[in-house]
Image (tube, rainbow, N blue to C red):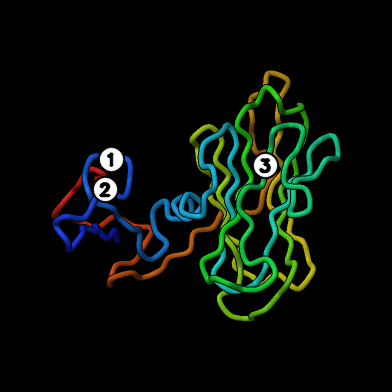
Amino acid sequence: LVSLIAPVDPTAGQLFKWPNRFSWSYNGQVTDSIKQRVKAAGGSVEGVLCCRLAWSNHDDLDFHMTEPSGEKIWFRSKHATSGGQLDVDMNAGYGSTRTPVENIFYRDSKRMKPGIYVLEVNQFNQRETIDVGFDVEIDIGGTVHSIRYDKAVRNKDTVQVAKIRVNADRSIEIVESLPTSVAVRTEWSLPTQGFHKVSVIMNSP
């Protein structure tokens, strides 16, 4: 489920910050691959609130966050006065990838106004009728809430994913959301979302 990658050329230099020439890749969209896809796309995965959207076709889905003040984070306005930011916006204009992601994050809760934040997914351009639906991760201080929406989103329709409340003490909680469901897939003859006996456990390179 994870590919460990090493250079063929023994004189190859380091690609990353760690002091060796290894890297790795997640396979089959398992474990924390949505987070890894956001990182690979240049998005931030650190903050008090991180909302990650992933889907599996050439559609142009858009992440929207409407704040208590009415200010909205979306592709036309990627930065809010609260510090919230949309920093990854994929498949806009044309369908360039079948593993797209979008990412909205807040780094500092002190800048966030108390109240309800509404997270939505909009189907800006429906291009396919296969591999429909989407996955959303709502990461609140390291606790990840996973939501799977397995139906097609019709062209120009909007699906409300969650209502997130910032309290007066700047604590953050989900007060309403789509039901959480888990999609089970088979990767390398193993069904996902279950436990399997292993022969090797490794630290990250």
Q: Residue 60: where, in percent of width, then height?
A: 67, 68
List the residue tagged with mark 1. 18
Comparing 177 with 81, the one in front is 81
Label 1 neighbourhood size at 10 Å, few (<14), some (14-19), many (20+)? few
Q: Quadrant of the C terminus?
A: top left
Identify which residue is drawn at 71% across, 48% down: 119
What element does badge 1 sit on?
Answer: loop
Q: What separation in Å lies between label 2 and label 1 (alpha carbons)?
A: 8 Å
- Residue 12 coordinates in the image, percent (x, y): 21, 55
Q: Residues within 10 Å of mark 2 (few under 14, many from 20)?
A: few
Residue highlighted by disc 3: 85
| Outermost residue toward the front in this view | 11
Question: Relative to residue 146, is residue 29 drawn left or right?
Answer: left
182 left or right of 163? left
Label 3–label 2 contact, CB within 8 A: no
Q: What amino acid type should be assigned to the residue bearing mark 3?
A: Gln
Mark 3 or mark 2: which comes first in sequence?
A: 2
SS at circle 3:
strand
Q: Which mark is residue 14?
A: 2
